[in-house]
Amino acid sequence: MEIKRCVHVLLTLATVYGTSVSISSICSLPQVKGNCRGIFEMWHYNSTKDTCSLFTYGGCGGNENRFENCTQCMESCSTNENRTEICQLLEKEADEDYYSGWDDNTGGDGYTAPPREAYDEDYDEE
């Protein structure tokens, strides 16, 4: 709902200043990571596939075709009646992809810590 309010304000300002901006033009913009090196998970609408996808936003620059969650993305851009169900599947899939690289010894995606026993052998309590 918040994104719709922001888009409404944007459209109102665009009308006042004589610029024609529409939701469809925002939703047809390409996915742009931005200029900075931040790591923010955002959602982008793909107008060819009529669905949203997760991408890593750098934190600055880019364009308006980025949303904080799948629901905002689909509600703003898609005409598909099954938006809620699609988002549930996409979000579950994104979570599974993210955690698939983890195991019990992983401190983060791609960085594996040694097992606790390795520390215990080298640690001598005094």
Image (cartoon, rainbow, N blue to C red):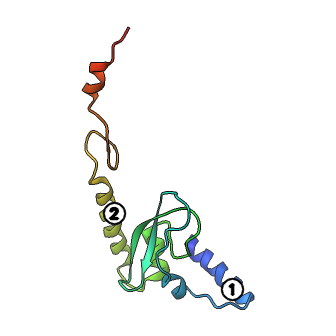
Quarter location, residue 71: bottom left
Residue 103, compared with residue 115, is above or below; it is below
- Residue at left offset 27%, top offset 52%: 101
Residue 115, compared with residue 51, is above or below; it is above
Report x, y in % for residue 56.
Answer: 45, 63
Crowding at dot 2, Cα within 10 Å, few <14 / some 14-19 / many 20+, comes out as: some
Residue 120, compared with residue 68, is above or below; it is above
**Residue sitting nearer the eye, 76 or 34:** 34
Q: Which mark is residue 4?
A: none
Report x, y in % for residue 114.
Answer: 28, 34
* Residue, disc 2: 94
Q: Quadrant of the N terminus?
A: bottom right
**Residue sitting nearer the eye, 76 or 49:** 49
- Which type of secondary structure does the marked residue at label 1 adopt? helix
- Residue at left offset 70%, top offset 89%: 15
Question: Disc 1 versus disc 2: distance between alpha carbons?
Answer: 35 Å
Residue type, numbered disc 1: Ala
**Residue sitting nearer the eye, 5 or 42:** 42
Report x, y in % for residue 36.
Answer: 55, 61
- Residue at left offset 53%, top offset 68%: 34
**Residue sitting nearer the eye, 83 or 44:** 44
